[in-house]
């Protein structure tokens, strides 16, 4: 390569970044150490985020990761989470490391309670407040989520909040453990199913089927003691914000014109419930209180008869059911705005109801051995009857939360 080409190539170099997420104890540090010990001469800068003051993971990596003290660097970010309170610090730290032009790679271990989307946004959007555009120096290469194969179902069905486990990122952190697990799984490029040594083949196959349905785009790799080929998570070129944002299984199902059934071997399946009729709020509430156990994940929008202006969103994972306002229906907008919207989104016009416009119930259900006909029939019972359709909908009782602030767990 002549010198000019080489200089140009170096000027274009953007340091690749891999982010490891995954619930507490899933095996992130173990994986990081394994990758560092097999890094094949790459000069790596590592950022380790810990919620507590004492960064134990950093100490372990320092001891076991074999980083060269002269050529490489370990940065500890403690006492907060890089997806929220320490986001600004992450921006500045990555900018500082990238500008040194000493490293070939940046590896980040997020806290176990960190959400991947805000971390990915840190690399994708210009931060106006700090005037930093990380995309000038870095290229987010791969978002990795580590899943603990042994603890998954336990954590999934525990019904506990992070605060109840004393794992909250702050005193107001009311997130449920299962919602965090699902957020981490639904936004990633690679899923590492770790601790496979502790689970039978049959259970692993079933869990793998569930994870693939929740997250069809990511590459799924089984690991034991974090032993993964570094090439699977470094310099993969897999990250793409737009693709990752719409990669969740429920979103694909919702947008897929034709539903392709998953493998039936473990009875894992999904379907979309679509009805252009509103729900009777009290009957729907009762249905939700008796939520069928076979449903692992549900997500979508709902139309309550008492709320003709606003769509409601529903998001369920295990015992956690979140329900709350999701914005105005297009049919509730002034006519001029409606026209503009319909011009911009012609597919909205295709499904426009002459009386109710875009108001609709559209919910994806993912589960094991889902009794689709039964679920649909019982939900149909919660829709307004023919007679109720003619009555005053506003006079119905509505037990659901009224505002976004009130939006809460139903169970
Ligand atoms: N049996 C078994 N144990 C594992 C495996 N991977 C990691 N461990 C153990 O699980 C525990 C937690 O592993 P870590 O790598 O510290 O997990 P982490 O995700 O970094 O944990 P936090 O930083 O607390 O979120 C340690 O005791 C590991 O030795 C595995 O594949 N099998």
Image (cartoon, rainbow, N blue to C red):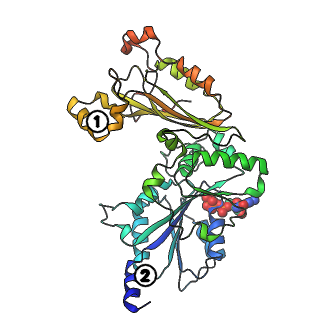
Which one is nearer the viewer's eye here, 260 or 267? 260
Where 33 falls versus 320 (above or below)? below
C-beta proximity under 8 Å, tags 1 and 2: no
Q: Ligand 1 is in which quadrant of the figure?
A: bottom right
- Identify residue for label 2: 101
- Quarter holding the C terminus? top right
Whether residue 386 appears in this view of the structure is yes
Q: Position of residue 108 (x, y in %)?
A: 52, 66
What percent of the width, then of the height, locates residue 410? 53, 30
Between residue 263 and residue 146, name the one nearer to us.
263
Q: Nearer the viewer, mark 1 or mark 2?
A: 1
**Is residue 84 in sight in this rendering?**
no
Count neighbours of disc 2 (C-alpha within 10 A) and say few if under 14, some if 14 to 19, many if 20 or more. few
Element class at badge 1: helix
Judge: label 2 CB < 8 Å from ligand 1: no
Which x, y percent locates residue 403? 38, 31
Quadrant in the picture for residue 33: bottom right
**Secondary structure beneath disc 2?**
loop
278 versus 117 height, above or below: above
Q: Residue at x 62, y 55 (%)?
A: 24
State the count of labels. 2
**Residue ranking furthest to the left:** 336
Q: Quadrant of the N terminus?
A: bottom left
In the image, residue 152 above or below residue 354: below
Residue in front for this viewpoint, 8 or 197: 8
- In the displayed structure image, the side of residue 186 where residue 357 appears, left or right: left
- Identify residue for label 1: 342
């Amino acid at each position: 390569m002549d010198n000019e080409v080489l200089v140009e190539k170096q000027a274009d170099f953007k340091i690749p970044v891999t982010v490891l997420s995954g619930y507490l104890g899933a095996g992130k540090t173990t994986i990081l150490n394994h990758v560092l010990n097999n890094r094949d001469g790459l000069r790596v800068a590592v950022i380790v985020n810990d919620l507590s003051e004492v960064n134990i993971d950093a100490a372990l990596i320092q001891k076991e990761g074999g980083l060269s003290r002269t050529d490489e660097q370990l940065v500890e970010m403690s006492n907060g989470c890089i997806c929220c309170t320490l986001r600004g610090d992450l921006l500045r730290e990555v900018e500082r490391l990238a500008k040194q032009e000493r490293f070939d790679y940046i590896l980040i271990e997020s806290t176990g309670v960190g959400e991947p989307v805000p971390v990915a946004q840190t690399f994708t959007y210009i931060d106006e407040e700090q005037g930093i555009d990380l995309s000038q120096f870095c290229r987010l290469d791969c978002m990795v989520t580590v899943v603990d194969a042994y603890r998954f179902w336990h954590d999934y069905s525990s019904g506990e909040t992070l605060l109840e486990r004393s794992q909250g990122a702050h005193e107001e952190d009311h997130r449920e453990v299962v919602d965090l697990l699902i957020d981490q799984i639904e936004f990633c490029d690679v899923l590492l199913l770790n601790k496979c040594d502790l689970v039978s083949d049959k259970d692993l196959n079933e869990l793998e089927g569930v994870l693939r349905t929740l997250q069809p785009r990511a590459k799924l790799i089984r690991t034991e003691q974090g032993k993964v080929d570094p090439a699977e998570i470094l310099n993969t070129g897999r990250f793409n914000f737009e693709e990752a944002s719409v990669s969740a299984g429920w979103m694909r199902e919702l947008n897929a014109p034709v539903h392709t059934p998953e493998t039936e071997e473990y009875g894992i399946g999904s379907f979309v419930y679509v009805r252009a009729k509103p729900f009777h709020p009290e009957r729907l509430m009762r249905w939700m209180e008796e939520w069928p156990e076979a449903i692992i994940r549900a997500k979508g929008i709902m139309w309550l008869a008492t709320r003709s202006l606003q769509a409601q969103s529903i998001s369920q994972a295990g015992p956690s059911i979140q329900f709350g306002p999701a914005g105005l229906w297009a049919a509730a907008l002034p006519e001029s705005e409606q026209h503009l919207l319909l011009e911009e989104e012609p597919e909205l016009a295709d499904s426009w109801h002459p009386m109710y416009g875009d108001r609709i119930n559209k919910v994806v259900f993912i589960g094991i051995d889902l009794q689709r006909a039964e679920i649909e029939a019982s939900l149909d019972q919660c829709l307004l009857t023919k007679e109720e359709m003619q009555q005053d909908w506003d006079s119905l009782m509505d037990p659901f939360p009224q505002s976004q602030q009130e939006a809460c767990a139903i169970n």
